């Protein structure tokens, strides 16, 4: 392999934005090189929801979510791999009925005050413990996905979305 290469575009970063940009530039006929320290989609981009969530979004974002959903449903035809996309449902519980509950509680009652303080302390403790462990849980999950990648790619065929030979550049960045 030569020490240099040329292309119409060089994308730095193989996350969601970098690979999407590279894909659309290739579809426009441009030659593209993606420079990524590890492998594409290694970190948060490999675990995202693909922009298809509609629940809890601002109404102005819904058309973009709809467009993303159409792409994800035909992603295998588009790039030759399903990318592990699975549509799952979401549920949001209505909160308006709880308003009546709080109007009937006597907050001046000492027992209620003690229970609220205990509940607040438990909630803060849970948040602190979750905050301490969640980076480790996320890192372990990513390492597992990275490790499993060597054994399973879901298709049995080499993933080649651009129809070209890959060029790998190694080094410290």
Image (cartoon, rainbow, N blue to C red):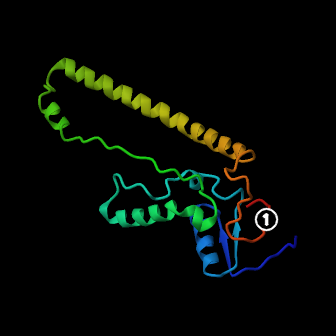
Quarter-wise, where is residue 166 in the image?
bottom right
Residue at image location 41% in from the left, 62% down from the top: 65
Q: Please give the residue where the numbered disc 1 appears in the rendered image.
A: 169
Q: Give the quarter of the image for residue 22.
A: bottom right
Q: How many marks?
A: 1
Q: Is residue 42 left or right of residue 53?
A: right
Residue farthest to the right, as pictured: 1
| Position of 118 relative to 100 (above/below) | above
Q: Residue 142 appears at what percent x and percent y?
A: 63, 44
102 sits left or right of 129 in the view:
left
**In-image side of 55 versus 18 (left or right):** left
Q: 65 or 41: nearer the eye?
A: 65
Give the residue drawn at x 26%, y 25%. Answer: 116
Residue 33 position, x and y percent, is 71, 72
Q: Secondary structure at mark 1?
A: loop
**Can you say which quadrant of the picture contains the N terminus?**
bottom right
Residue at image point 78% right, 64% down: 168
Residue 157 coordinates in the image, percent (x, y): 73, 56
Q: Residue at x 65, y 71 (%)?
A: 11
């Amino acid at each position: 392999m030569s020490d240099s290469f040329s292309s119409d575009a060089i994308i730095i970063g193989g996350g969601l934005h970098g690979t999407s940009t590279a894909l659309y530039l290739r579809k426009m006929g441009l030659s593209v090189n993606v420079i990524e320290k590890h492998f594409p989609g290694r970190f948060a981009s490999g675990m995202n929801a693909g922009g298809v969530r509609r629940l809890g979004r601002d109404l102005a974002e819904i058309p973009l979510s709809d467009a993303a959903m159409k792409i994800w449903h035909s992603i295998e035809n588009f790039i030759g791999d399903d990318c592990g996309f699975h549509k799952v449902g979401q549920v949001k519980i209505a909160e308006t009925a709880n308003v009546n509950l709080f109007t009937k509680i006597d907050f001046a009652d000492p027992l209620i005050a003690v229970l609220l303080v205990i509940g607040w302390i438990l909630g803060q403790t849970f948040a602190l413990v979750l905050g301490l462990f969640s980076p480790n849980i996320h890192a372990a999950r990513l390492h597992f996905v990275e490790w499993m990648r060597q054994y399973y790619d879901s298709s049995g065929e080499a993933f080649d979305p651009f129809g070209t030979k890959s060029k790998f550049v190694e080094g410290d960045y």
